[in-house]
Amino acid sequence: MSSPKPVRTVLTIVMDALVLLAIAETVRLVVQFFGALANSAWGKAIIALTNPITIPFGIESIKTPYGGSFEVNAALTVVAFLLVEWVLSIVRSRS
């Protein structure tokens, strides 16, 4: 059995990190969707922690009937992270 290539290992680590970032952004989406969650102490902490990784696409949030908002920028960030992760998985499988 041959040892794994270092490139594959690095790609796997980057892919795993992208999945974790996408999960964090998804949690942010849920918290902001419900205003009561977004106004709690831990909800504010989640939003503050994910602010640096949310890509500013310049699209306004949509108000929800639950007192929160659907943050389109965060949703598009999840899509972007998962798209890059998918492309890296193709690169990794061919290396």
Image: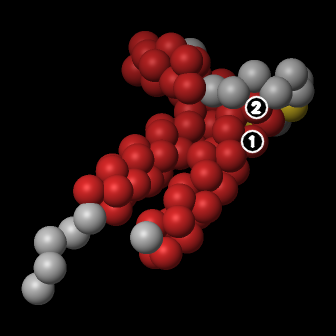
Please tell me which residue is depicted at 46% across the width and 19% down the height of the picture. Answer: 49
Quick one: label 2, few (<14), some, or many (20+) residues within 10 Å?
some
In this rendered view, identify the residue nearer to me: 12 or 56: 12
Picture coordinates of residue 41 (x, y %)? 43, 14
The amino acid at mark 1 is Leu
- Name above or below for residue 94 compared with residue 69: below
Check if mark 1's residue and mark 2's residue have beta carbons within 8 Å. Answer: yes
Q: Residue at x 43, y 70 (%)?
A: 95
Q: Is residue 68 visible?
A: no
Q: Is residue 44 above or below residue 94?
A: above
Is residue 70 positioned above or below 81 on the image? Answer: above
- Rendered image: mark on residue 9: none
Determine which residue is flagged by label 2.
73
Q: Is residue 84 left or right of residue 42?
A: right
Which image quadrant for residue 29?
top right
Which residue, as the protein is rendered here, is positioned at the far bottom? 1
17 vs 58: above or below: below
Amino acid at pointer 2: Asn
Q: Give SS at disc 1.
A: helix
